[in-house]
Image (tube, rainbow, N blue to C red):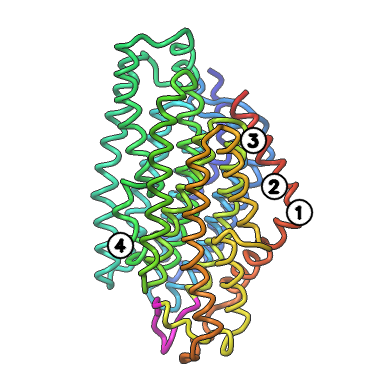
Amino acid sequence: MNIQHDLYVLLPELVLAIGAMVLLLVGAVRGDRSAKTLTILSVILIAVSAYLSMTIPDGTAFSGAFVMDSFARFNKAVILWSSAACMLMAHRFFDLERTARFELPVLMVLASLGMTLMVSASNFIALYMGLELQSLALYVLAAFNRDSVRSSEAGLKYFLLGSLSSGMMLYGISMIYGFTGSLDFHVVARVLAPGVQTGQLIGLIFGLVFLLAGLAFKISAVPFHMWTPDVYEGAPTPITAYLATASKVASLAMVVRAVVVPFPSVFHQWQQIVVAISALSMALGAFAAIGQTNIKRLMAYSSIGHMGYALLGLAAGSQLGIRAVLFYLAFYSFTNIGVFACIQAMRRAGRAVEGIADLAGMARTQPALAFALSALMLSLAGLPPVAGIVAKALVFLAALDAHLYALAIFGVLTSVVGAYYYLRIVKVMYFDEAAAPFDRTMGWSVAAIAGIATVLTFAFVVRIGVLYDTADFAARNLLK
């Protein structure tokens, strides 16, 4: 073991870890008046970490526990972009609420550190370490608005159910270790490569079930989605955006590596589990969102459905499928960031409003905001001419290529049903009688985030090759 080489491979994570400790010391000395300064420094830290992630060559650290490869690099780029955007949104949100605290950017840096460790983990203990670092920070962030009962309730629910899922995942990991004798992904794959005996197979399947149950909680997949609507509604809007984007990208990327790399020999066994979770998530996401009146609860069910679509690619278990998952995660991340930036702009008389009815006639009172939200909703619905149609087409094609015809057809049908509630929001903004206009308190940073996300929904259709090729290279690198 070469400690210098190991630290070099993990330099992006070291920057975040050391930076978070320094920011915490500065905040402890200067108090809440340093919140703006710490936010700016946190965004700079994220940018430096992203740059290092893109430039450090491939390698492994700490006896293979962590790996820097194209798959990790792709997901870190998406995670860190989402984190930086959510930090800027959060500072603006809490500034308007007059509850800005210095701990906020520090917690977000620590959560981002956990996420980057998750996507680099090549060992079940390393994976668990990154996951818990992310989770502990997110539990606090969900309850960060201490004056709100809903926020405190969201944090408590998230903590209790998250702890349960972590226990289930640990139990699954212990069973996998017991039947393979290793926690390293590649060693597990080598142990299982010659073939799996009947007794060993049964134990592995039980371990996989518990492992996937714990991981499914983190991506809000059915039937482990129960926390999602309440937490999305109760958490502060920028924290909900963080949960819906950076956290989901890190968690699903972790799921992909944790099943594809160690378990190619039992592909058909874990494929059946993923197919079931995918189908249930697509169905619930499509139908449960129809009756929602709160836009954040609607986005919660939307995220459940989108995780179901992304899991289509994982169920394929091929390079084509993993490429589709990565493309889908990138599309999903920037689109949801834009949607939540628009939701954050929904303030009337100095208070945040979240009802879909509050959007009535917005096209006449705030046409730019209405256009941005409409384009982003069309993208989530998978309709042309925006990026969502490409992302959904890729996962459906991957499923068809893997002969998952019934699942692909089911996905198309649920996508048609799901388009209803996205188009309903567009209809409310453009055709309903205008409600009172929102306060002009969006701020340049939030407006820029919404604008960039909207532009990207069109740009990725025109310049699809860049993202497509990058995702393809990352998928090929994972499977080599």
Query: Which residue is drawn at the image coordinates 59% and 69% (left, top)?
Result: 450
Q: Can residue 187 be seen by looking at this rendering? A: yes
Residue corresponding to mark 1 = 463
SS of the residue under disc 1: loop
Query: Distance of mark 3 from mark 1, alpha carbons?
Result: 18 Å
For residue 474, which numbered disc appears in the image?
3
Queried whether the magenta region covers residue 349, the answer comes back as yes
Do the residues under discs 4 and 1 have CB atoms within 8 angstroms? no
Q: Compared with residue 164, is residue 27 higher up or lower down, i.e. above or below?
A: below
Given the image, on which type of amino acid does mark 1 rest?
Arg
* In the foreground, 220 or 271: 271
Residue corresponding to mark 4 = 230
Query: Distance of mark 4 from mark 1, alpha carbons?
Result: 37 Å
- Which range of residues does the magenta coloring cover? 345-355
Residue corresponding to mark 2 = 467
Do the residues under discs 1 and 2 have CB atoms within 8 angstroms? yes
Do the residues under discs 2 and 3 have CB atoms within 8 angstroms? no
* In the foreground, 138 or 185: 185
For residue 70, which numbered disc appears in the image?
none
SS of the residue under disc 2: helix
The quarter of the picture where residue 461 lies is bottom right
SS of the residue under disc 3: helix
SS of the residue under disc 4: helix
Q: 10 Å neighbourhood of mark 4: few (<14), some, or many (≥20)?
A: some
Query: Which residue is drawn at the image coordinates 60% and 54% (left, top)?
Result: 331
* First-in-chain label (4 vs 2): 4
